[in-house]
Amino acid sequence: QSALTQPASVSGSPGQSITISCTGTSSDVGSYNLVSWYQQYPGKAPKLIIYEVNKRPSGVSNSFSASKSGNTASLTISGLQPEDEADYYCCAYVGTNTWVFGGGTKLTVL
Amino acid sequence: QVQLVQSGAEMKRPGASVKVSCKASGYIFTDYAMHWVRQAPGQGLEWMGWINGGNGNTKYSQNFQDRVSITRDTSARTLFLELSSLRYEDTTVYYCVREYNKYFDYWGRGTLVTVSS
């Protein structure tokens, strides 16, 4: 199972919106509405920010939203804040109790 | 509250094995599947394998199929990862992770395993 494809880096200015894509295949992202997203600060464990394509856990800012179209999932962060600067990873369930992560995207807030 | 407390850092020689533990608290241990995910320095996350909360069945990534074993001690509420035939590229942080409905809701703080001669 190959890793999902994410851009290595994205950047934006405070207040702007950015979108991170996560491209897979019809066997992973395209097969199930079971894509999740994780935020990770340097030296820290990842944190769940989106599950089941577009659902936010309690306590996660509504500045985070997500969607899926075909084999590509997307994470959008609106109204960028300096504290949004982190690494972001998508993850997809691919069936038979197997999961795959994206390669990760480093978000820089300019 | 849910807590996943992992064992401390390890240093191993190439070819050796390592066993990392993760003690869970704050929830019914056997109600949830658990996973191990690893991350090499400066690299992305890599899913390693899964253990069913109820019956202990396992499934491993093909990348580790022959070298990895995930087990648990339900009475001690502890999850284990054993990786054998260690290589330099196994120098990574290993995370234990709780699964809820096919996503990962709680993560341990990670255990650094260093493979060095």
Image (cartoon, rainbow, N blue to C red):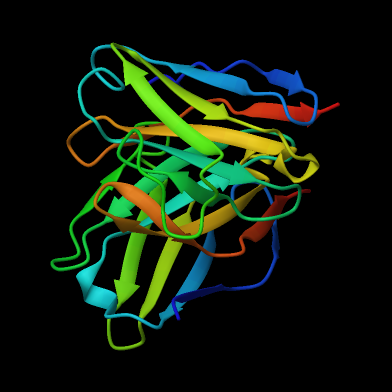
Figure quadrant of residue B61: top left
Towards the viewer: B37 or B14: B37
**Position of residue A55 measured from the top left corner of the image (x, y, whole percent):** 35, 43
Query: Looking at the image, which residue is at 45% across and 20% down?
Result: A4
Question: Is residue B40 found left or right of A57 in the rendered image?
Answer: right
**Residue B56 in view, yes or no:** yes
Question: Is residue B11 found left or right of B6 in the rendered image?
Answer: right
Query: Looking at the image, which residue is at 30% across and 39% down?
Result: A52
Height in image: A1 above or below B104?
above
Quarter that holds the N terminus of chain B: bottom left
**Position of residue A31 measured from the top left corner of the image (x, y, whole percent):** 20, 21
**Residue B85 in view, yes or no:** no
Figure quadrant of residue A108: top right
Question: Is residue A70 found left or right of B69 in the rendered image?
Answer: left
Height in image: B47 above or below B113?
above
Query: Looking at the image, which residue is at 51% across and 44% down?
Result: A62
For this orientation, the residue located farthest to the right is A110
Height in image: B94 above or below B64?
below
Query: Looking at the image, which residue is at 39% across and 52% down?
Result: B104
Figure quadrant of residue B98: bottom left
Towards the viewer: B20 or A48: A48
**Position of residue B71 measured from the top left corner of the image (x, y, whole percent):** 32, 65
Counting every numbered tag in the picture gives 0
**Position of residue B85 measured from the top left corner of the image (x, y, whole percent):** 53, 46
Question: Is residue B82 found left or right of A28 in the rendered image?
Answer: right
For this orientation, the residue located farthest to the bottom is B75
Height in image: B117 above or below B52?
above
Towards the viewer: A48 or B63: A48
